[in-house]
Image (tube, rainbow, N blue to C red):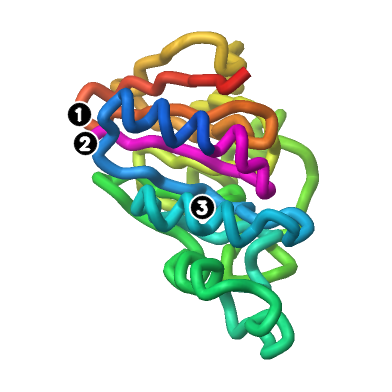
């Protein structure tokens, strides 16, 4: 299965349109949104409409939580049906073809608002890697949240910053996908284990 991976859109509709068009060109089977659709709410209707049209699935991020879990009446009156249709489908985490997706690191609980907003910088030493790789059994884990590319295995942070395609066919990996709001997105082939970083800029 070929996945189109997007995260941290933050209502940057122009970059999102480029990503969706590229996914169509690449013939992805499924688009996976890894959290943080919303920014200030000014282009949220359009953002969610595009995601619905693309049949994207995904997980909520720290910015999205209030629209996904029991949104108050005042918010329900503020935004269109498309917003709540898409946001209502988002999950705390997803597993697809054995891959684990969550907006935050897998040791954090994405159903806890406190954990969703936890930020101690990206993992950068062995203790932080240990808690990631002992949190879930999946061989491959994908996240967003940090607005940067990152590739880690249980014993190291790799010298990779989204500049080239990479094969994830041996061992276990934790991957942070670059943010759509910075012009970044990716494809991942679950059969070949090839991750291809892409850019709209």
Q: Position of residue 38 (x, y in %)?
A: 67, 56
Task: Assign the C terminus to one quadrant of the image.
Answer: top right
Residue 135 seen in this snapshot: yes
Disc 3 designates what residue?
A: 102
Q: Nearer the viewer, mark 1 or mark 2?
A: 2
Residue sitting at 73 percent across and 61 percent down?
A: 41
SS state under label 2: loop
Does the CB distance between marks 1 and 2 fall below 8 Å? yes
Residue 1's tag is 2
In the shown orientation, is residue 100 left or right of residue 151? left
The residue lying at 59 percent from left, 48 percent from top is 105
Residue 169 lies in the magenta-colored region: no
Tell me the distance, in whole angstroms, between the alpha carbons under discs 2 and 3: 19 Å
Segment colored magenta: 1-16
The answer to whether residue 154 shows anywhere in this view is: no
Mark nearest the camera among 2 and 3 is 2
Where residue 55 appears, as percent x and y from the top left, is 34, 53
From the image, tell me which residue sits under label 1: 191
> Is 15 within the magenta?
yes
């Amino acid at each position: 299965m070929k996945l189109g991976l997007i995260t941290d859109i933050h209502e940057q509709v122009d970059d999102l349109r480029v990503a969706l068009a590229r996914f169509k060109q690449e013939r992805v089977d499924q688009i996976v949104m890894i959290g943080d659709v919303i920014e200030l709410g000014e282009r949220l209707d359009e953002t969610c409409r595009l995601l619905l049209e693309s049949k994207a699935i995904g997980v909520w991020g720290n910015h999205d939580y209030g629209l996904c879990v029991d949104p108050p009446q005042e918010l329900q009156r503020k935004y269109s049906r498309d917003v709540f249709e898409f946001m209502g489908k988002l999950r705390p985490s997803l597993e697809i073809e054995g891959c684990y997706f969550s907006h935050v690191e897998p040791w954090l609980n994405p159903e806890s608002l406190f954990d969703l907003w936890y930020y101690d910088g990206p993992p950068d030493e062995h203790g932080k890697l240990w808690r990631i790789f002992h949190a879930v059994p999946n061989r491959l884990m994908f996240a967003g949240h940090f607005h940067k590319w990152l590739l880690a295995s249980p014993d190291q942070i790799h010298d990779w910053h989204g500049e080239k395609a990479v094969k994830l066919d041996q061992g276990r990996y934790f991957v942070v996908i670059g943010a759509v709001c910075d012009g970044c997105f990716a494809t991942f082939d679950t059969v070949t284990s090839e991750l291809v970083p892409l850019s709209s800029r």
